[in-house]
Image (spheres, rainbow, N blue to C red):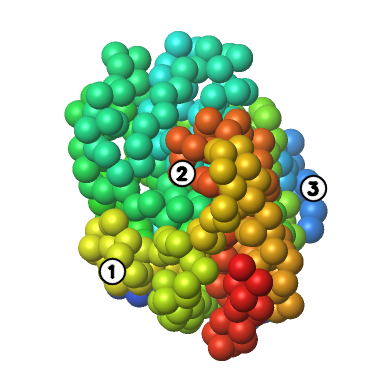
Amino acid sequence: MMKPDTPTNDPKKIPRVRLPADARPDTLAVREGLPRTAWGENSEALFLTSSFVQPDAATAAARFANEEEAFTYSRFSNPTVMMMERRLAALEGTSGCIATSSGMAAILLLVMGLLKAGDHIVCSQSVFGSTIRLLQGEFSKFGVQSSFVSQTDVAEWQAAIRPNTRLLFAESPTNPLTEVCDIRALTAVAHAHGAWLAVDNCFCSPALQRPVDYGADFIIHSGTKYLDGQGRVIAGAICGAAELVEQKFVPVMRSCGMSLSPFNAWVVLKGMETLSIRMREQSARALQLAAWLEAQPAVARVYYPGLASHPQHALAMAQQGGMGGAVLSFVVRGGAAANPVGAASDARARAFAVIDHTQVCSITANLGDTKTTITHPASTSHGRLTEDQRHAAGITQGLIRVAVGLDDVEDLKADLQRGLATL
């Protein structure tokens, strides 16, 4: 567990909240941030300002030169954003964090801060579709090379290492098939070759899993998901060692400005106060729904780490605090199409029928909400990938993803049964 820094009276440092050194995660989730202002507010203040007035020109010069820690301009320094960063870092067990305008902006900042033309990334082939597009499409134009490997086969990661490999990137669990990687094993592969390991912890959040405990160097977040928890704002973050955050990412942020707005930071900050409660309850409901789906004749397969049938069930339980998370996917049984193209089309139509018969679930590709969401990954979150890329990732046309919220589980079962009954 990270111990909060000792409060300091150093006028050149931004002060810390005074908390016990052994404060536990649930306490940090509601207390870590910045000291109260002179007004003594109990709920954290929202600083909606683009700039900050300096006492004199000499102080302004010192602060802009980073000789003195202070707030100057909200593109790279804002009190509300810092409160969110400090709280997330405390929960993830890291000494540093930098917030970004979205989860994809966090991955953009990660690669821009760490790599240069000629460097190489090894990435899971099962990550979010936009991540594949960003690494394989956009960064290839600037000379950053990428290889994609099996999420779960450590030997493939090892075999893909090149002399110029600088970064390994994984999600755990993945979107949408909930594949779980062995973070400790990937850490060993990365560090043995002088590379960093970054883990997208969006599905679990630090309430269930802390990748740094298994050696990961950087943790990526889409705060849009469980950190907010109610689908209100777009946000992202990178957690890691404070020295690396300052050296690698802050300079890029100052120049490029993929900044998180103070208002969005405040919403995420407040969302983290209930994170552990929500994750425990939503995970419990997801397990009930997954077990029910596994027993349905119209369902061919269920993907959920909390089920004993999941290929990485034991690993998931060890890494994720004994919980499977709140996201599951399932495949509807196929039709009688006689050819592969027809079979795919039929599977898609059957998946659409299940989705379209729901009355409770929200048909949206977002997840992490208190409202249960349902989507067809092959045509939404992974719709921009080629069919070959989707096939490599195991994303078929018959696959449906459900992100379980706080709806009554019996209502969710009835909601899905309406569609399954049509098959």
At horizontal 36% and vertical 24% (from top left) the residue drawn is 166
At horizontal 55% and vertical 72% (from top left) the residue drawn is 404
Is residue 103 visible to us here? no
Q: Which sits in the foreground, 399 or 288?
A: 399
Q: What secondary structure is found at the residue carrying circle 2?
A: loop
The image position of residue 322, as x and y in percent, is 30, 72
The image position of residue 33, as x and y in percent, is 54, 65
Separation of residues labelled 1 and 2 (CA atoms): 20 Å
- Residue 19's place in the image compared with 55, above or below, is below
At horizontal 63% and vertical 59% (from top left) the residue drawn is 351
- Residue 188's place in the image compared with 27, above or below, is above
Q: Which residue does the numbered mark 1 point to in the structure image?
A: 308
Q: Which residue does the numbered mark 3 point to in the structure image?
A: 50
Quarter holding the N terminus is bottom left
Q: What secondary structure is found at the residue carrying circle 1?
A: loop
Q: Amino acid at mark 2?
A: Gly
The dot on residue 403 is none
